[in-house]
Image: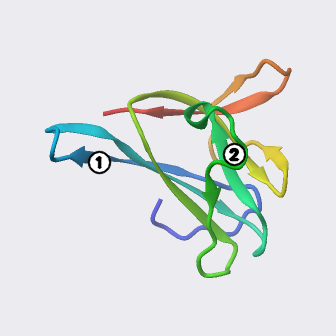
């Protein structure tokens, strides 16, 4: 999502791009970019089935201090569930309509990485 969108305090998006491993001759996964637009100075993470739901394993970084946070992950093809963790609060991605029920009576976002 290369277009700049209006700031939404609960927004993230994911893009996929193949990432090759020239030594092995086979792709090692696809680059997925998570973004979040909110207030500068927050602690933002992404947690999901790709990192055992660790709420501090993958921070999103606001490099320019503008409230636009980003993290890049390399994920294999498959379907993943995730949530954002903003200042300790687990939230859904409002820009991703793909959701599934979780074991706690709530919902998670769903991300499918395709070839």
Q: Earlier in the sequence, mark 1 or mark 2?
A: 1
Please indicate, yes or no, whether residue 113 appears anywhere in the rendered image.
Answer: yes
Q: Left of 111 or right of it: where is 55?
A: right
In terms of secondary structure, where does tag 1 sit?
strand
- Vertical arrangement, residue 57 with respect to residue 63, above or below: above
Among the 4 quarters of the image, the one containing residue 42 = bottom right
Circle number at residue 19: 1
Residue drawn at point x = 17 percent, y = 38 percent: 24
Q: Left of 91 or right of it: where is 67?
A: left
Q: Left of 65 or right of it: where is 114?
A: left
Quadrant occupied by the C terminus: top left
Circle number at residue 93: 2
Please indicate, yes or no, whether residue 97 appears anywhere in the rendered image.
Answer: no
Q: CA distance from mark 1 to mark 2?
A: 24 Å
- Vertical arrangement, residue 94 with respect to residue 110, above or below: below
In terms of secondary structure, where does tag 2 sit?
loop
Which residue is at the far top? 103
């Amino acid at each position: 999502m290369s277009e700049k969108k209006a700031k939404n305090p609960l927004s993230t998006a994911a893009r996929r791009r193949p990432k090759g491993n020239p030594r092995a001759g086979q792709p090692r996964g696809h680059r997925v970019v998570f973004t979040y637009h909110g207030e500068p100075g927050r602690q933002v993470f992404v947690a999901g089935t790709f990192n055992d739901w660790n709420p501090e394993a993958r921070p999103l970084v606001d490099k320019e201090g503008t409230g636009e946070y980003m993290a890049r992950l390399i994920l294999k093809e498959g379907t993943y569930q995730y949530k954002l963790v903003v200042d300790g609060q687990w939230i859904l991605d409002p820009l991703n309509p793909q959701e599934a029920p979780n074991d706690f009576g709530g919902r998670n976002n769903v991300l499918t990485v395709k070839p």
